[in-house]
Image: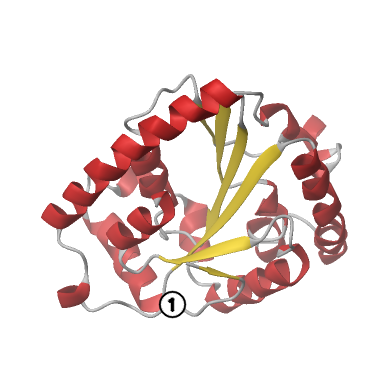
């Protein structure tokens, strides 16, 4: 895990963590997560975790590993649908703010306000001017969130183009995984370099001292999950 930009390479299968070892490490980390949950409740801590990354990077699996042994009353996952016409007329971050944590809560965003800097910009759902305005303003918004007492953690999951293609093909060929695919996913896979430029621009403006980006190499999904939970 590292701050800011990081290039990921596909991990050879022989170096990827075996499932048996992964489950053993994960079990131990789940025990620590339960202890963390008790601390969050007892101290009234407010935690907000943002997960971003390319399609197929493993955000959903990481969130599942993080939350499967803790209370949903404490750990809440937020994955908002496309904005309504009314929400489109509001300040971009406005629809996310009601979901920020209160005392004793951990809120996890499965994609977040950074949609404006990523998918919306690349796929033409906002103008470059709108994306630039967002990137200039978001450090101030996040500073206010942190100043209010929220612990803000921002994770970017990175995969190589080869690994992303392999996972896409697995979803297409495995009937159990086709539910993960949308027409938008298929379009986005062809825009690798556009997403790379958008990512770099996002890091440039929003990788701040009070809310830094933590980048996880997710070519080995099991190792990435353990590293993030640790």
Q: Would you say 181 lies left or right of 130 here?
A: left
Asked where in the image residue 19 lies, by quadrant, the reply is bottom left
Q: Residues within 10 Å of mark 1 (few under 14, many from 20)?
A: some
Q: Residue lying at the far left in this picture: please name it.
A: 20
Residue 38, image x and y in percent? 45, 25
- Residue marked by disc 1: 8
Decide which of 111, 186 is in the foreground and name it: 111
Q: Would you say 133 lies left or right of 116 here?
A: right
Q: Is residue 173 above or below residue 74?
A: below
Residue 73, image x and y in percent? 48, 19
Q: Please give the count of numbered marks on the rendered protein.
A: 1
Decide which of 118, 127 is in the foreground and name it: 118
Give me the residue at 70% from left, 47% from top.
Answer: 113
Q: Residue lying at the far top in this picture: please name it.
A: 73
Residue 26, image x and y in percent? 26, 46
Asked where in the image residue 92 lies, by quadrant, the reply is top right
Asked where in the image residue 147 lies, by quadrant, the reply is top right
| Rendering colour mode | secondary structure
Decide which of 173, 117 is in the foreground and name it: 117
Give me the residue at 18% from left, 74% from top.
Answer: 13
Q: Is residue 150 above or below residue 3?
A: above
What element does badge 1 sit on? loop
Give me the residue at 31% from left, 44% from top.
Answer: 29
């Amino acid at each position: 895990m590292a701050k800011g930009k990081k290039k990921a390479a596909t991990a050879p299968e022989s170096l990827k963590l075996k499932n048996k070892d992964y489950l053993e490490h994960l079990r131990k980390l789940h025990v620590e997560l339960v202890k963390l949950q008790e601390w969050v409740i007892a101290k009234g801590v407010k935690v907000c975790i943002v997960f971003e990354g390319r399609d197929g990077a493993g955000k959903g699996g990481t969130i599942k590993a993080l939350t499967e042994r803790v209370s949903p009353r404490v750990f809440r996952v937020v994955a908002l649908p496309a904005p309504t016409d009314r929400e489109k007329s509001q300040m971009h971050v406005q629809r996310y703010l009601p979901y920020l944590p209160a005392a004793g809560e951990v809120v996890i965003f499965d994609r977040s306000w950074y949609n404006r800097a990523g998918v919306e910009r690349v796929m033409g759902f906002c103008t470059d001017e709108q994306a630039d305005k967002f990137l200039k303003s978001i450090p101030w918004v996040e500073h206010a969130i942190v100043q209010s007492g929220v612990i803000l953690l921002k994770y970017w999951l990175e995969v190589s183009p080869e690994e992303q293609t392999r996972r896409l093909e697995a979803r297409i060929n495995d009937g159990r995984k086709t539910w993960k695919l949308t027409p938008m996913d298929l379009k986005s896979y062809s825009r690798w370099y556009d997403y790379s430029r958008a990512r770099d621009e996002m890091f440039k403006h929003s990788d701040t001292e009070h809310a830094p980006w933590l980048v996880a190499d997710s070519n080995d999904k099991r190792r990435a999950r353990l590293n993030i939970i640790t």
